[in-house]
Every structure is written in C-alpha cells, then in structure tokens.
Image (spheres, grey):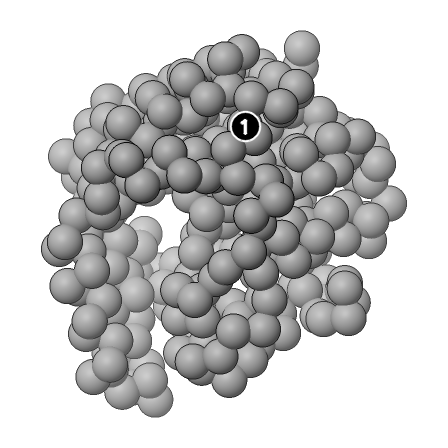
Amino acid sequence: MKEQILKINKVDICTESFGNSKDPAVLLIMGSMSSLDWWDEDFCHRLAEQGRFVIRYDHRDLGRSTIYDPGTSNYTITDMADDAAGVLDAYSIEQAHIVGMSLGGMIGQILALRYPERVMTLTLIASSVFGTEMEKLPPMDQRILDYHVKSSSIDWANHEAVISYLADGWKTLAGSKPYEQERMYKLAEREVDRAKQLPSRFNHAMLQGGDDYFDRMGEISVPVLIIHGTEDPALPFEHGLALAKAIPHAELVPLDGSGHEIHSEDWEQIIDSVVMLSSR
C-alpha cells in the first residue's frame, strides 16, 4: 500500500495503491461523504491479489484531499469525474476498469461518457441512474435522513463521539446481514485520524452539475456490471433494476440481503465479478 498526495485539477487528491502497477488498473470510486477508508484495506489487498493494480482515493472535502469551508459549494459532479480521470493521468494509466459505489457509480457513468477512451469496464455498486428517471424511483429511507440530522449537534472535537456517529451511520444503511460493528468502528477511527476537517464532508449534499450527461446511460458502450443489494435502504433495489434497463448490455448481480454497503460476506462475489468482467 502506498499513499500519495497528487496535484490534480489544481487541487490535492490523496490516493493509495495496492499491487503491481504493471497489472490491469482498477480505480475504486467511493460514494458521497465517504473517504477512501470505506474501501476496506483488506478488500483492496484481496482484489490486488487477483492480478489487479488497485487505486482508491479521497474525494474533495474528504480525508487528506483538498477541503473547503463547511456549507460551501465549490465544484460539480463533472469536476469529480475529471478528478478521477486526473488520478489515472497521475499514475500514467491510459485505461482502467472503473468500480464506483453509490455516488461513485454516477461519477463512473459520467467518466465513461466523458472519457470513453479511458474506461475499459464499469462496475456500479449500490448506485442509480444518472438522470431524470431517478426521480421516479423509490426514495431513501427516512430513517437515514433522520439519523444524519444528528450531525448538527455533534462535537467534532470529541474523537469517540465522531467515530460512533460515522460508524453507526452505516448501521442505518445495512440490510439483513449482520451489522459489522467492529469493522465499521475500525474504519471510522481511521477516517477520523486521517481527515483534515470532517464537517466539510456535508458539502457533498450540495453537489450539482452533470446536466450534459443526464439520461445518456444507453450511450455507454463498455462492458457494465451492476451489483446491488436487494435490501438497500438508501437506493432501493429498483434503482439497480433501472440501471440494468437504462444500460441494455449491462449484467445485474443481486446481493441477497445486502443493504447500501460493501459487506464482507459479499467481498468474494464482488471481487470475482469484477475480475471476471475485467478479464473479458
């Protein structure tokens, strides 16, 4: 594992890589308000052991990447897709297999449309269609929104309270598989220890842009894999079905009992699916 702070699009982006740089590259793009830490280090190592060069990175306003004042909007989702392309440039990677989680899947869709020559395959985990169709799909469970109302009363200087808030937030996203409390607290502690300014994460809630790429999923020509939990409370399974319909050549892999998460019980299936797709 090797961490680097790279200058990309005039901002700092923190990245970490796993495996042999000569192997086919897999770029992991995490979701909204989630640092690279939530691509579990063990998950990354296991994927790298399958002969893949794995890169994960912090979005702006997360981890050790550039942060802005909380409550401000300084970039668009298209800028975030440009950041992903910039990570590939910084590693001198011409083409990569893209794996996006939630918002990361939407960034991946823009990336495949904006830089089609850079994307070899696209895997969308717990994500949704990028466009007007999303408004017709089942909404996020209200309990998730209610939980995050707590953020206004969090003492961000209280290390233990912040770790608990971040870790237990994933409990609201879980399906019926056992909530992995020990692992979530470990990852939350790492994020708290690394982050420059945790409240800046909520700037992602104001994210806009990308209108030029709305409702264009059918133009994505690379092989696409859609992986979606059948009990996802944030983006219900219908979102995965809508993606499969919008990208006609895509393959849908349901994760029975999984929520809006990358549960360790699903790692083997996810990694095998990504490796198989990237071996075509």
Quarter occupied by residue 97:
top right
* Residue occupying the point 55% across, 80% down: 68
Residue 252 in the figure: left or right of residue 220 = left
* Residue occupying the point 50% across, 13% down: 248
Residue 114 in the figure: left or right of residue 38 = right
Q: At which x and y percent is residue 21?
A: 79, 39
Q: Secondary structure at mark 1?
A: helix
**Vertical relation: 269 (above or below) 132:** above
Residue 39 makes an appearance in the image: no
Total count of labels: 1
**Residue position marked by numbered label 1 in the rendering:** 217
Q: At which x and y percent is residue 200?
A: 46, 76
**Vertical relation: 200 (above or below) 78:** below
Quarter occupied by residue 16:
bottom right
* Residue occupying the point 26% across, 53% down: 170
Q: At which x and y percent is residue 276?
A: 58, 14
Front residue of 182 and 81: 81
Q: At which x and y percent is residue 165?
A: 24, 69
**Crowd band around label 1 with a 10 angstrom C-alpha radius: few (<14), some (14–19), many (20+):** many
Front residue of 126 and 269: 126
Q: Amino acid at mark 1?
A: Met
Residue 228 in the figure: left or right of residue 178 = right
* Residue occupying the point 22% across, 44% down: 139
Front residue of 77 and 101: 77
**Vertical relation: 21 (above or below) 3:** above
